[in-house]
Image (spheres, grey):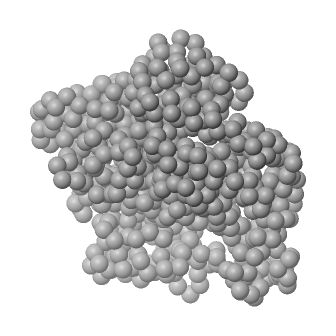
C-alpha cells in the first residue's frame, strides 16, 4: 500500500483554515470555537495562513506566544494542527521597506503593497525574510506533538496577481536559466525559430520575458518563460521546505488549485510529501450537477495521480464562495456527496475555508462552518457535523485502501501552454483543451471507472488504456514510451491536433513521431464554421464533425468512421491500427458527447476495462473503488448520487453497507445528493 505520510495521526482529517489571529481580542470567541469544533467532529485545523503580520509584527521581532497557546489549547481537546508558513501574504513593514519583494507587471510597473500571492520569488531579500520566519517557526513548533503537517505558503503562485514577476532580477535569472538550458544563442535561436520576423538574438541581454509591450508572439519564448516561472516558484518553495525542516521531520504539503494554468504542478510533486488542493466546484451552476461533478472528479484524479498516492482536500466550502460571478449556496445534501467524492477518489481529508467567517474585509461573506450569527444551530453547521460523524465512522476502513485505475489520460501543462498559445485552426483561447479533455473523461465517470491523469513524463506501465486528447506537443521521449506501450499490448487513443510539435514548439517535418503507430498522417486540418457543418458516420449512426477536423491519409490504419460531406467526404474520421501486440485509435474530428460515450463504451466492452460495480448506472450516479491495501482491509465502493432526487442502483451481487453493516440485496436505494460506501 502507499506509505502512511501523516504518521502522527493516521485518520481522515476533518477541519480547515482557522484564523485565531483575527480574534485575539475576543478570548470568548476562541473558546466557543473549540466547543463547536468538538461538536462538529473537527480533528485538525490549519493555522498561520496569512498570519505574517501577527507572527512578526515588526522586522525580526517574533510574536509566537499566541500561536503556541492556540496549538496547545486545541491539542488538549484532541485537535491537531496543520501549521502554515505565512508567505502567502506579506506584511506592510516588509513591502514598504523593501520595494524589491513586490512583483513587477509584464508592462514593467511595480505593484503597490497589498493583496496576496504577489511576492517576487527571485528577490534575495524576500528569500532571506522567508527563511528567517520559517526557521523560527520550525524551531518553536517543529517538534510539537500537535503539529502533524507543514502547509507551505498558500496556493503557491495564486491568482490575485500573476504567478510570475517581470522585475530586473527575474529577467536576469531567466537569461541565466536560458544560458544553462541552451548553451549558445545559436541553439536558442534555432529552438525559438527567431529568424521569423527577423527576431534573431545576438546578445543574451536582448532577451526579455514576454510582454504585451514587447514580444508576445514568439511561442518558444512564451513556453520557456512559463517553464522558468515554474522552476523559480518551485525553487522558492524548496527553500521554504528546507527552512521548516531545520528543526522538524514533519511532512510537508502545498495546496494547489486543480486546473490552474500558471504553474506546472506535477513538477512540484517530488518535493511534496502529500499532495493537497483547494476544491471549489461551481455546484448548481448548470441545469444538473453532472458536468460539475465530472470537473471535480478530474481534479481529484489529477492530484492523486501526481504521486499515485492519497492526497488531501485542503480547502472546500461547506456552503458558498464569495468570488464567483454568481455565488449559489450548496443545496441540502450536496456538502455530503461532494465531500465524499473527494474521499472516494483518494483524499484523506475534508478541510474547509473557512472555520469562522471573518468579520470584515474581502472574505467576510465567504462560506464558513461558523457564521456571524447563531453559530451552532444552522443548516450548514449541522451538515458539517453530520459529515464529521460519517468520516469518523469510516476512517479506519478508508485509510488502508487506495485507487488503482486501469486507465490513464494524458493531461500535460506544457502541452496546455503550447496548444493555447498557438495561432492555428482556432485562436488559442478557443482551443478548449480542458473542456475537450473532460469530454473524453466523462464516459468513464458515467460508467464508474476510475482514471489516473498523468503528464507526458509519467511511467505508462501498468495501464490497459491510455487516452491523449489534443496531444499537440510531444516532449522528448514521449513518442518512444507510447510506442513501447502499444507494442506490449496497450490500447492508445489520441485525437486531432496531436503530434504536431516538439517540446520547443517546432513543427515536426518529414514524418510525425507516431505515424507508424497510428498508421496515418495528417494532410490538412479544417476548422469548419456554421456555414460548413459536417458529420461522420460510425457504427451505423451519424455524429457531428465540428470544431477541428483532420483530413488524414491512412498508411495501414483501418477506417472505422467516414466524413459525410464537404470536400473530404469519405475520408477517415476515426481509425484503428494494429501495432505490435496493441492497438492505436485516432479520432480525427471533434464531435458530440454522444459520440464519446458510444465510442468509449465500445472500447470498455471490447478490452474488458473493469467498472467498479459492473452494472448500468442511473444518470448522475457514479462509483469509485478504493482497493484494500493492507492485511485485513476491505475493498470499498463509493456509490455517489449527484441528482437532487432519489435513485435506485442495481447491484451485481450482495454488498454490505460500511456505515451500518447492513447486507444489501439486488439494489441500493439512494437519497438525492448522497453517498453510500459498500464492501
- Tell me if residue 438 can be seen: no
Question: Is the residue 401 above or below the residue 460 in the image?
Answer: above
The number of numbered badges drawn on the structure is 0
Residue 262 visible (yes or no): yes
The x, y position of residue 557, in whole percent, is 37, 77
Residue 431 drawn at (x, y percent): 60, 57
Q: Residue at x 46, y 33 (%)?
A: 75
Q: Quadrant of residue 78?
A: top left
Identity of the residue drawn at 46% across and 20% down? 35
Q: Is residue 136 above or below residue 214?
A: above
Q: Residue at x 34, y 76 (%)?
A: 486
Q: Position of residue 571 (x, y in %)?
A: 45, 70
Closer to us: 33 or 506:
33
Which quadrant would the C terminus be assigned to in this image?
top left
Residue 490, quarter of picture: bottom left
Q: Position of residue 115 (x, y in %)?
A: 75, 40
Camera-side residue of 2 and 191: 2
- The quadrant the N terminus occupies is bottom left
Relative placement, left or right, of 515 versus 415 is left
In the picture shown, does residue 678 fall above or below 630? above
The residue sitting at 61% across, 29% down in the picture is 20
Q: Is residue 604 above or below residue 365?
A: below
The residue closer to the viewer here, 434 or 221, is 221
Amino acid at each position: 500500500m502507499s506509505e502512511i505520510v501523516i504518521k502522527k495521526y493516521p485518520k481522515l482529517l476533518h477541519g480547515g483554515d482557522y484564523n485565531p489571529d483575527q480574534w485575539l481580542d475576543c478570548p470568548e470567541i476562541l473558546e466557543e470555537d473549540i466547543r463547536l469544533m468538538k461538536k462538529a467532529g473537527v480533528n485538525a485545523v490549519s493555522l498561520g495562513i496569512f498570519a505574517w503580520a501577527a507572527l512578526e509584527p515588526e522586522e525580526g521581532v517574533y510574536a509566537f506566544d499566541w500561536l503556541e497557546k492556540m496549538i496547545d489549547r486545541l491539542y488538549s481537546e484532541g485537535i491537531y494542527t496543520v501549521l502554515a508558513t505565512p508567505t502567502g501574504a506579506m506584511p506592510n513593514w516588509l513591502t514598504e521597506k523593501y520595494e524589491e519583494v513586490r512583483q513587477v507587471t509584464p508592462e514593467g510597473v511595480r505593484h503597490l503593497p497589498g493583496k496576496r500571492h504577489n511576492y517576487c520569488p527571485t528577490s534575495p531579500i524576500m528569500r532571506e525574510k522567508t527563511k528567517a520566519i520559517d526557521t523560527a517557526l520550525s524551531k518553536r513548533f517543529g517538534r510539537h506533538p500537535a503539529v502533524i503537517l507543514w502547509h507551505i505558503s498558500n496556493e503557491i503562485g495564486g491568482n490575485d496577481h500573476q504567478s510570475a514577476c517581470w522585475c530586473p532580477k527575474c529577467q536576469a535569472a531567466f537569461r541565466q536559466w536560458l544560458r544553462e538550458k541552451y548553451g549558445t544563442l545559436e541553439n536558442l535561436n534555432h529552438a525559438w525559430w527567431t529568424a521569423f520576423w527577423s527576431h534573431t538574438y545576438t546578445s543574451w541581454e536582448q532577451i526579455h520575458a514576454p510582454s504585451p509591450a514587447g514580444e508576445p508572439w514568439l511561442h518558444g519564448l512564451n513556453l520557456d518563460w512559463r517553464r522558468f516561472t515554474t522552476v523559480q516558484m518551485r525553487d522558492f518553495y524548496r527553500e521554504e521546505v528546507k527552512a521548516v525542516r531545520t528543526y522538524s521531520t514533519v511532512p510537508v504539503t502545498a495546496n494547489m488549485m486543480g486546473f490552474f494554468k500558471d504553474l506546472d504542478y506535477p513538477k512540484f510533486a517530488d518535493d511534496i510529501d502529500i499532495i493537497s488542493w483547494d476544491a471549489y466546484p461551481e455546484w448548481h451552476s448548470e441545469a444538473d450537477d453532472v458536468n460539475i461533478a465530472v470537473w471535480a472528479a478530474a481534479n481529484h484524479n489529477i492530484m492523486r495521480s501526481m504521486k499515485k498516492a492519497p492526497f488531501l482536500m485542503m480547502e472546500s466550502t461547506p456552503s458558498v464562495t464569495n468570488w464567483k460571478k454568481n455565488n449559489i449556496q450548496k443545496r441540502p445534501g450536496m456538502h455530503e456527496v461532494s465531500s465524499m467524492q473527494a474521499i472516494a477518489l483518494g483524499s484523506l481529508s475534508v478541510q474547509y475555508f473557512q472555520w469562522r467567517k471573518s468579520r470584515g474585509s474581502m472574505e467576510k461573506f465567504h462560506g464558513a462552518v461558523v457564521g456571524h450569527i447563531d453559530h451552532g444551530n444552522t443548516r450548514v453547521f449541522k451538515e458539517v457535523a453530520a459529515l464529521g460523524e460519517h468520516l469518523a465512522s469510516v476512517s479506519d476502513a478508508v485509510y488502508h485502501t487506495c485507487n488503482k485505475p486501469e486507465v490513464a489520460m494524458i493531461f500535460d501543462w506544457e502541452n496546455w501552454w503550447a496548444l493555447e498559445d498557438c495561432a492555428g485552426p482556432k485562436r488559442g483561447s478557443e482551443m478548449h483543451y480542458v473542456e475537450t479533455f473532460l469530454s473524453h473523461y466523462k464516459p468513464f465517470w458515467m460508467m464508474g471507472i476510475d482514471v489516473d491523469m498523468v503528464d507526458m513524463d509519467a511511467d505508462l506501465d501498468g495501464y490497459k488504456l491510455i487516452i491523449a486528447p489534443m496531444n499537440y506537443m510531444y516532449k522528448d521521449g514521449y513518442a518512444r514510451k507510447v510506442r513501447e506501450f502499444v507494442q506490449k499490448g496497450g490500447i492508445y487513443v489520441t485525437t486531432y491536433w496531436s503530434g504536431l510539435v516538439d517540446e520547443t514548439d517546432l513543427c515536426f517535418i518529414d514524418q510525425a513521431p507516431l505515424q507508424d503507430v497510428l498508421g496515418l498522417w495528417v494532410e490538412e486540418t479544417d476548422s469548419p464554421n456554421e456555414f460548413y457543418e459536417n458529420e461522420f458516420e460510425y457504427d451505423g449512426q451519424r455524429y457531428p464533425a465540428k470544431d477541428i477536423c483532420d483530413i488524414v491519409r491512412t498508411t495501414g490504419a483501418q477506417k472505422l468512421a467516414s466524413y459525410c460531406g464537404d470536400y473530404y467526404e469519405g475520408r477517415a474520421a476515426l481509425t484503428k491500427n494494429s501495432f505490435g501486440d496493441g492497438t492505436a485509435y485516432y479520432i480525427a474530428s471533434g464531435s458530440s458527447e454522444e459520440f464519446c460515450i458510444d465510442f468509449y463504451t465500445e472500447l470498455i466492452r471490447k478490452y474488458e476495462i473493469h467498472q467498479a460495480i459492473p452494472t448500468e448506472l442511473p444518470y448522475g450516479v457514479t462509483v469509485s473503488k478504493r482497493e484494500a491495501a493492507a492485511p485485513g482491509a476491505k475493498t470499498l465502493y463509493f456509490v455517489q448520487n449527484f441528482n437532487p432526487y432519489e435513485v435506485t442502483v442495481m447491484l451485481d451481487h450482495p454488498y454490505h453497507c460500511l456505515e451500518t453493516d447492513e447486507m444489501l440485496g439486488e439494489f441500493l436505494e439512494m437519497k438525492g445528493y448522497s453517498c453510500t460506501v459498500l464492501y
